[in-house]
Image: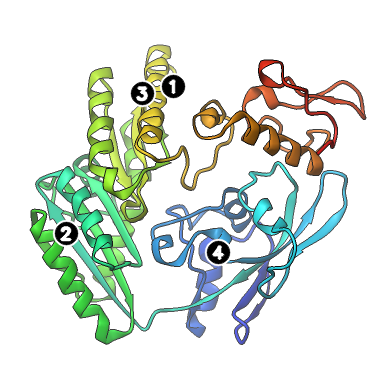
């Protein structure tokens, strides 16, 4: 349930099962919205968003979930109810609120969420830019940000994604012959938007854009966004399963990393389609496959492992918004030192000493809690390091 909305103070209090889009639908008539907008916002819950620190297309300008959560009511594994943060900015002491957001259910369960609302922008410009080259589209992204423009959203889709969207019920009118398109949205005060749109148009054309088209009205804008947000579902029609990867690389490395992703997939004989938050370098290579075929599963595993290594080598990291879960535990050593991982395990054990909540998530398998009794907890620490036991910090 949405428990309360305080428009004067820009605050909403919700229970964790409220759908992301539901909050914006309730507040829109009064001129407000909740800014983080995952592609799954019609289905995903705000509690899940907190657990994953979810992002979305418009988080380039407005920030991810953590930037919009003011407070949480949390049930700890021992049943204790605690308040983290509050209804106003809370900067004193340790940032326990920030620690909890993105913890994937390993520290506690959020039962009440206090969120910051944003005013709906007074004006919006939405551009569709198409290219004969995926690499040129990636280079345009770096050019736009380097020029000092921060769009509200800057999304990229490649040829395969375009085709699957256009074959779906949410066809958006994307050019089927394009190798890539950018969906770029600007918002703010009316006088500045046309100038920014003009600068973006010049930058994109400098990098080889074929056409730059601006949505003429809200209906056309909504259609462009409906296609983009339906992209993952559309790709899901291609095979029984789809592996959706999530990683982040520096914007200046987008073109190189995308080229490497295609090299890897071509070599392994798998099909890849790309739809991602290009503005912040958040990649989402999608690989359709059939999980009933063990050879395909093995091949997909090799592909994703190599892609993760490529992203880290490019100066990136292993997750942007989808979290770690169990699948990416094996990659944590690529980006964190043993000391850092050991400290994370110690922090987790303070909150969740018996490993009752979401066991096995985030940290590598060697940090899994093994309950020898009701009071003693053993961790198989790496390389003969001292075991992390109980709530020792």
Of tags 2 and 4, the one toward the viewer is: 4
Q: Label 4, label 1: how many angstroms apart (C-alpha)?
A: 37 Å
Apparent side of residue 288 relative to residue 345 in the rendered image (left or right): left
Q: Which mark is residue 23?
A: none
Q: Does residue 4 appear in the picture of this structure?
A: yes
Comes first in the chain, label 1 or label 2? 2
The residue carrying mark 4 is 67
Q: Secondary structure at mark 2?
A: strand
Comes first in the chain, label 1 or label 3? 1
Q: Which mark is residue 291?
A: 1
39 or 351: which is nearer to us?
A: 351
Comes first in the chain, label 4 or label 1? 4
Residue 348 figure quarter? top right
The residue carrying mark 2 is 129
Return the x and y of residue 344 as percentages of the image width and height.
Answer: 68, 38
34 or 153: which is nearer to us?
A: 153
Q: Which mark is residue 303?
A: 3
Q: Is residue 217 above or below residue 106?
A: below
Q: Secondary structure at mark 4?
A: helix
Q: Label 1, label 2: how many angstroms apart (C-alpha)?
A: 36 Å
Q: In which quadrant will I find the N terminus?
A: bottom right
Return the x and y of residue 181 as percentages of the image width and height.
Answer: 19, 52
Comes first in the chain, label 3 or label 2? 2
Apparent side of residue 304 relative to residue 107 in the rendered image (left or right): left
Of tags 1 and 3, the one toward the viewer is: 3
| Residue lying furthest top | 295
Q: Label 3, label 2: how many angstroms apart (C-alpha)?
A: 30 Å
Of tags 1 and 2, the one toward the viewer is: 2
């Amino acid at each position: 349930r949405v428990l309360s909305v305080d428009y004067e103070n820009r605050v909403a209090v919700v229970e964790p099962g409220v759908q992301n889009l539901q909050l914006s639908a309730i507040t829109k008539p009064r001129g407000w919205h909740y800014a983080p907008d995952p592609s799954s916002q019609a289905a995903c819950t705000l509690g899940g968003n907190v657990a994953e620190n979810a992002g979305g297309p418009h988080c380039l300008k407005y920030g991810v979930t953590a930037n919009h959560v003011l407070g949480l009511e949390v049930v700890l594994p021992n049943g204790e109810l605690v308040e983290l943060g509050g209804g106003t900015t809370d900067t004193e002491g340790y940032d326990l609120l920030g620690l909890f957001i993105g913890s994937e259910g390993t520290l506690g369960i959020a039962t009440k969420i206090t969120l910051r609302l944003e005013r709906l922008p007074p004006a919006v410009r939405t551009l569709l830019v198409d290219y004969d080259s995926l690499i040129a589209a990636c280079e345009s992204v770096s050019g736009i940000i380097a020029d000092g423009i921060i769009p509200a959203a800057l999304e990229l889709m490649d040829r395969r994604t375009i085709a699957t969207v256009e074959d779906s019920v949410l066809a958006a009118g994307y050019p089927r012959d394009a190798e890539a398109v950018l969906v770029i949205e600007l918002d703010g005060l009316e006088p500045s938007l046309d100038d920014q749109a003009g600068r973006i148009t010049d930058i994109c054309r400098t990098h080889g854009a074929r056409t730059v088209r601006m949505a003429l009205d809200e209906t056309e804008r909504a259609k462009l966004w409906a296609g983009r947000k339906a992209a993952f579902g559309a790709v899901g029609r291609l095979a029984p399963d789809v592996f959706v990867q999530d990683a982040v690389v520096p914007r200046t490395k987008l073109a190189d990393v995308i080229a490497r992703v295609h090299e890897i997939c071509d070599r392994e004989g798998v099909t890849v389609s790309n739809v991602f938050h290009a503005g912040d370098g958040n990649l989402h290579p999608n690989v359709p496959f059939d999980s009933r075929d063990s050879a395909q599963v093995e091949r997909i595993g090799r592909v994703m492992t190599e892609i993760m290594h490529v992203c880290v080598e490019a100066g990136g990291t292993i997750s942007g918004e989808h979290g770690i879960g169990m699948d990416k535990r094996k990659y944590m050593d690529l980006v964190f030192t043993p000391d850092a991982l050991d400290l994370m395990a110690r922090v987790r054990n303070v909150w969740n000493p018996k490993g009752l909540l979401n066991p096995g998530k985030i940290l590598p398998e060697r940090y899994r809690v093994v309950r020898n009794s009701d009071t003693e907890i053993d961790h198989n620490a790496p390389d003969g390091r001292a075991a992390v036991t109980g709530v020792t910090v």
